Amino acid sequence: MKSNATLFDLFLTGALVICVVSLFFLKLFFGKNGSTILIQTSKDKFAYSIDQKIVADISGDLGLTKIEIDNGKFRFLESPCKNKNCVNSGWVRSANFPVVCLPNRVSAYIMKEGDKDASLYDGVTR
Amino acid sequence: MNGSNNKIALFAGLSSFLAVFENFIPIPVPFLRIGISNIPVSLGFVLFNFKELLFIVLFKTIFSHLFRGTLFSYVFLIALSGNLLFIFITFPFYQIFKKRISFISLGLIGAISHNLGQIFASLIFLPAKSALLIGYFIISIGLIFGFANGYICNIVYRKFFTRALYGQVV
């Protein structure tokens, strides 16, 4: 075992750094996001296509939450909650990254392509 | 046995102490560990055989989780998986490349194998697949900490080990 950095160390470090950076850019530019946004309240569940430009009015426990969907991304536009943490979360483009408004009991996330969302069903019997 | 029992006990104890101690080091992200407990384990590669290293790693994992109070939880299973994959990948790597590498390579391979083991175990034991979301982040940060730990190991090895093992500074 050498006690100083060797050429092999530098090569391995460089290769791993290149792998990590490449993966980052591959995911950034070619990573597939989801096509459906799932919105849940304490009473209902809604599914919207993410590839459209609409503002969805969702009725929660406190009042109306407005969720803006804009071609691949969404954000909580307005909410009757006190702290507005959900509104301050801003735009979400990544799949499986939920935004939750606890006081109004409204949550939303982009479902990843190919994922089966078990939460859409009350129960499954086989 | 390559190493005496006293040496194994010293390295197992030191590693366990550092595993508990690193919980007190504040890190902005709660699930991250610097991995300083792996410094004695990495240094042990030059002193011990596979069985002895496996004992040190198992002792460290069990002791640190006993101290944290998470011995009978999925956290222990995840940590154990990471440590086992670490030893099963890093030891053959060391045996093959030991004449060409320093501890930096060992730290990098150790960090990757450790993190991969934890991610695989999380996918098995946790119902949510959240490990995949943070997996890339964990491996990236793990590489930085692995490099840093390897660099520290190099310094410790140069200052204390080479003189003791070979009678000179290499």
Image (tube, rainbow, N blue to C red):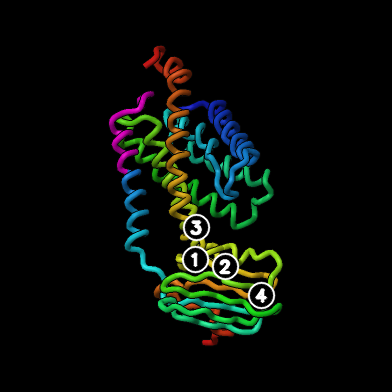
Look at label 3 and name its amino acid.
Ala
- In front: label 3 or label 1: 1
Look at label 2 and name its amino acid.
Val
**Dot 1 or dot 2, earlier in sequence:** 1
Q: Which chain does the residue under circle 1 lie in? A: A
The residues colored magenta run A1-15
Q: Residues within 10 Å of mark 1 (few under 14, many from 20)?
A: some
Q: Are marks 2 and 4 on the same chain?
A: yes
- In front: label 1 or label 4: 1
Name the spot of residue A37 as percent of width and height, x first.
48, 76
Q: Please tell me which residue is depicted at 44% across the width and 52% down the height of the picture.
A: B116
Q: Nearer the viewer, residue A36 or B72?
A: A36
Name the spot of residue A47 as percent of width and height, x first.
50, 82
Residue on which disc 1 sits:
A92
Look at label 1 and name its amino acid.
Val
Q: Residue B86 sits in which quadrant?
A: top left
Q: Quadrant of the N terminus of chain A?
A: top left
Q: Is residue B94 above or below residue B141?
A: above
Q: Which chain does the residue under circle 3 lie in? A: B
Q: Is residue B30 left or right of residue A72?
A: right
Q: Which mark is residue A105?
A: 4
**How far apart are the alpha carbons under marks 3 and 1?**
28 Å
- In front: label 2 or label 3: 2
**Dot 2 or dot 4, earlier in sequence:** 2
**How far apart are the alpha carbons under marks 1 and 2?**
8 Å
Q: Are marks 1 and 4 on the same chain?
A: yes
Q: Is residue A85 left or right of residue A95?
A: right
Q: Is residue A17 above or below residue A7?
A: below
Q: Is residue A73 magenta?
A: no
Q: Are circles 2 and 3 on residues that touch, CB within 8 Å?
A: no
Q: Are circles 1 and 2 on residues that touch, CB within 8 Å?
A: yes
Q: Is residue B102 left or right of residue A102?
A: left
